Amino acid sequence: MPICPECESVLDFDEEEVDEGDVVVCDECGTEFEIVATDPLELSKVEEGYEDEDEEVEDEEEE
Ligand SMILES: [Zn+2]
């Protein structure tokens, strides 16, 4: 079983069940990891807000 790089808990998935590009979540610390390679297994931490980076903040200025 894979080990969470963040908190060293055992991750609740089998490395044979995942494919590259899948995202897994650590039950212990809640960190998301993208599977970047499966042989050997390689995880890349998904930074929070990564996909929402372009989100625009609405201004509510009154003139
Ligand atoms: Zn963890």
Image: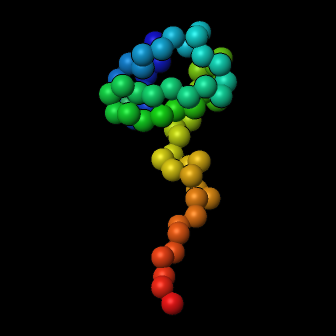
Nearer to the camera, 27 or 54: 54
Residue at horizontal 53 percent and vertical 69 percent from the top = 58
Percent x, y for residue 6?
40, 35
Percent x, y for residue 1?
46, 12
Q: Place residue 4 in its image quadrant.
A: top left
Percent x, y for residue 60?
48, 76
Nearer to the camera, 57 or 9: 57
Residue at horizontal 38 percent and vertical 33 percent from the top = 30
With respect to residue 32, does 12 lie above or below? Answer: above
Count the labels in the image.
0
Picture quarter with ligand 1: top left
Residue at horizontal 36 percent and vertical 25 percent from the top = 27
Image colouring? rainbow
Is residue 8 visible in the rendered structure shown here?
A: no
Nearer to the camera, 26 or 5: 26
With respect to residue 58, does 19 lie above or below? Answer: above
Q: Place residue 18 in its image quadrant.
A: top right
Is residue 31 visible in the rendered structure shown here?
A: yes
Percent x, y for residue 53?
58, 56
Q: Looking at the image, which residue sits at the far front?
A: 63
9 sits to left or right of 23 = left
63 sits to left or right of 39 = left
Q: Looking at the image, which residue sits at the far bottom?
A: 63
Residue at horizontal 51 percent and vertical 11 percent from the top = 14
